Amino acid sequence: MKWKSGLMHGLLSAAVASVAAIIYNILYTKAFIVDFSAVLNTGGTIFSSTLGCVLMAVGYIMITGRYGTKWAGYLNLGYVLLSFVSILGLFSFHLPLEIESPELFPGLAIPMHFFPALSFMAFAPFFNYWKEEQ
Amino acid sequence: MKTIVVSALILVSGIGLSFKTLTETWMPDNTKYSVKISSSKFEGIFKGLKTNIHFDETKPEQASIEASIEAETINTGNGLRNKHAKQGIEAAKYPTIRVVSTAISGKGNQFEFVGKLTIKETKRELKFLFQFMRLSPSEGLFNGTFTVKPSDFNIKKSGTPESFIVTLNIPVTK
């Protein structure tokens, strides 16, 4: 039950994070008249959001299952920290030379790195990690 | 006297006209050219190429080549590095990087360019080998590579590589 519920949590979070990232990408691209589709496309966005959210769910299932739900807080802190760390690489990321305005790329990609963790934490209270301990 | 002056003017303008018709004027293909720089630290490209190329491979001694690029267009693929590079070459203050030939020699499709390179209003002699390939009667391709030392042009911003290799690939049409 915990695995099923946890994976549902991961997949729902991934879907919402993906939709948010895709909408943000469209808005950003139109607002700044840039095209980063060669390095940041819809398929990649969905894949990375799904991977991130499912891994977070697996972490929740395994750690809270073994050590109790109070560890969810530490996991949340860890997920936020990892999200912050993941943006550091974006500042040194080299785009293909034919892509113009690379200085605008971090503004697109950095918020997207937080969408999976935000979405995952927003939905966490709706899933029954907590109920099983009561 | 008047007749002599008029005759001299006609002669001079005739020589000028015949000189121009001896060389061929080429225009770059603005969608396909590349002006690439590479170093141990990064690669980049410039845009905004403007040229004035008079070149006939059978008469290279009569050729003249002038070309400029816009310093602000440098793109290294990274926003922070672009900013650093633009500061190094002071792109806002010195918007143009220019080469002008003083002598061109060679034969076949191998030629030597001798001229001046101007960066940040600092002129230095530039000498390099280049190739010209005639792809059709009205199409050609210039290829060349040369090395630039930033310190020669008073580019001293920290982190600037000791030297860059500049690679030119310029398809042209008449």
Image (spheres, rainbow, N blue to C red):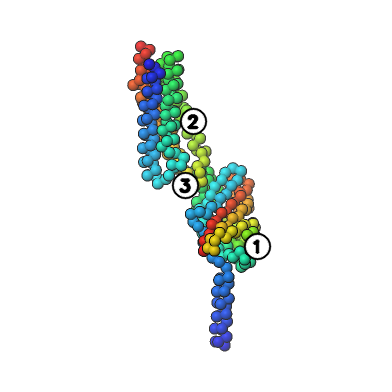
Q: Are marks 2 and 3 on the same chain?
A: yes
User: Which comes before the other along the chain, label 2 or label 3?
Assistant: 2
Q: Residue at x 36, y 41 (%)?
A: A27
Q: Quadrant of residue A80?
A: top left
Is there a contact, CB below 8 Å, between mark 1 and mark 2? no
Q: Residue at x 59, y 47 (%)?
A: B38
User: x and y percent of residue B60 in the render?
Assistant: 62, 65
| Label 2 Cα crowd, 10 Å radius (few <14 / some 14-19 / many 20+) | few
Element type at mark 1: strand
Asked whether residue B52 is in view, the answer is: no
Element type at mark 3: loop
Please name whichever residue, B20 or A126, is drawn nearer the observer in this view of the structure: B20
Q: Chain of mark 2?
A: A
Instruction: Please state, as top left, top right, bottom left or bottom right, where the N terminus of chain B lies in the image.
Output: bottom right
- The span from disc 3 to disc 1 (Cα, nearest Å) is 38 Å
Q: Amino acid at mark 3?
A: Glu
Q: Is residue A50 above or below residue A131?
A: below
**Residue at far front of view:** B136
Q: Residue at x 59, y 42 (%)?
A: B41
User: x and y percent of residue B124 in the render?
Assistant: 62, 57
Name the mark on residue B107: 1
In this figure, which residue is indicated by the disc labeled 3?
A100
Q: Amino acid at mark 2?
A: Val
- The span from disc 1 to disc 2 (Cα, nearest Å) is 57 Å
Q: Amino acid at mark 1?
A: Lys
